[in-house]
Image: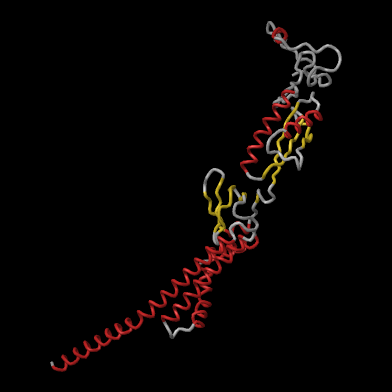
């Protein structure tokens, strides 16, 4: 019995000693943890302040995208450095070299697990450095068209013309074709006008150019032009081309005024604007030519009087009477 009590006392003493050791370690670790947390928070705030400062410094400059890249890289670099110092302070036995080695081994697993995220991140860095487009440009990517609001390290934010926001992964933008409508500041528009075959196409071209020159927003250099392009089925096609500011709203506004002005100008000058028509010619099926391919033509045969059309009376004459058999005409049905 006494031996059992001694064993219980020994277990209690060991437990209390363990608890006392944990408490002592915690009390000794708390100051280190507090110092490490303060260091990491300090580096976090410095990184955030550096990013904001670089963004403000390069806000209206050509090197804005480069500034964004440097700001984000410096921010993440400072955060990583702060984390490394904080871990070293909290755990003095851990050396920075050991942490870097552990990160090197774990980076392989991280790369496989976050392949898409890393791909979009690297693509975002390359987009910001190469600058195929900038914030404020109007672009077309697949079925999305709008203004670039922001270029983040993972996605590009596009505001569409109908007021929607689209987040496009940078990996897709970097590996697919993107049309930048505002890259050169100017944009050419064109519209086909059909005039009648009886009208003077050259005169109509001159009138179209005059109409375009009278529209506010059509640039004088490059000058507008009108080119005869095609002899279509129902009209002669004249293509009007003009240059405007590249932004979408200006393109649509000028296009509206240009087409209305062209219609008014041609109408006042008596230029016909025909709508598509179709002429259907039937093979002649009169009694005189029925079955005779040398005379059966599309329309009337050239020269002479037109053949007599098939009438109800003629059709009745061709019917057998009094039970007599009907004799087919030579070459007829």
Tell how many labels. Answer: 0
The answer to which image quadrant residue 125 occupies is bottom right
Q: Position of residue 122 (x, y in %)?
A: 58, 65
Q: Position of residue 144 (x, y in %)?
A: 58, 48
Position of residue 165 in the picture relative to residue 284 (left or right): left
- Name the outermost residue toward the left: 1
Place of residue 164 in the rendered image (x, y in percent of width and height, measured from the top left): 52, 47
- Residue 285 picture location, percent across and down: 75, 17
Give the answer, above or below, for where 222 lies relative to 91: above
Q: As drawn, which residue projects farthest toward the top?
A: 322
Q: Nearer the viewer, residue 239 or 55?
A: 55
For residue 108, above or below residue 188: below
Q: Residue at x 52, y 45 (%)?
A: 163
Asked whether, in this view, residue 30 is left or right of residue 332, the answer is left
Q: Quadrant of the C terminus?
A: top right
- Say which quarter of the image contains residue 226: top right
- Name the residue at 69% across, 9% down: 312
The colour scheme used to paint the residues is secondary structure
């Amino acid at each position: 019995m006494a031996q059992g009590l001694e064993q219980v006392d020994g277990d209690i003493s060991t437990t209390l000693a363990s608890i006392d050791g944990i408490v002592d370690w915690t009390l000794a670790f708390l100051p280190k943890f507090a110092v490490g947390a303060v260091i990491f928070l300090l580096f976090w705030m410095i990184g955030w302040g550096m990013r904001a400062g670089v963004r403000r410094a390069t806000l209206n400059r050509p090197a804005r995208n480069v500034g964004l890249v440097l700001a984000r890289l410096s921010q993440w670099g400072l955060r990583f450095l702060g984390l490394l110092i904080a871990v070293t302070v909290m755990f003095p036995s851990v050396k920075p070299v050991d942490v870097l080695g552990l990160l090197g081994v774990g980076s392989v697993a991280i790369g496989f697990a976050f392949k898409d995220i890393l791909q979009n991140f690297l693509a975002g860095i390359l987009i910001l450095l190469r600058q195929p487009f900038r914030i404020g440009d109007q672009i077309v990517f697949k079925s999305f068209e709008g203004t670039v609001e922001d270029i983040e390290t993972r996605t590009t934010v596009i505001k569409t013309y109908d007021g929607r926001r689209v987040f496009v992964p940078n990996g897709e933008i970097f590996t697919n074709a993107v049309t930048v409508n505002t890259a050169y500041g100017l944009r050419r528009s064109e519209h086909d006008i059909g005039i009648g075959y009886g009208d003077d196409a050259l005169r109509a071209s001159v009138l179209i150019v005059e109409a375009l020159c009278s529209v506010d927003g059509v640039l004088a250099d490059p000058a507008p032009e009108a080119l005869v392009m095609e002899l279509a089925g129902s009209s002669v096609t004249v293509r009007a081309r003009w240059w405007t500011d590249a932004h979408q709203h200006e393109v649509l506004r000028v296009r509206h005024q240009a087409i209305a002005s062209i219609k008014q100008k041609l109408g006042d000058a008596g230029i016909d604007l025909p709508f598509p028509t179709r002429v259907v010619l039937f093979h002649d099926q009169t009694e005189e030519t029925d079955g005779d391919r040398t005379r059966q033509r599309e329309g009337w045969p050239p020269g002479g009087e037109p053949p007599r059309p098939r009438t109800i009376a003629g059709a009745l004459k061709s019917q057998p009477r009094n039970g007599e058999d009907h004799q087919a005409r030579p070459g007829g049905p």
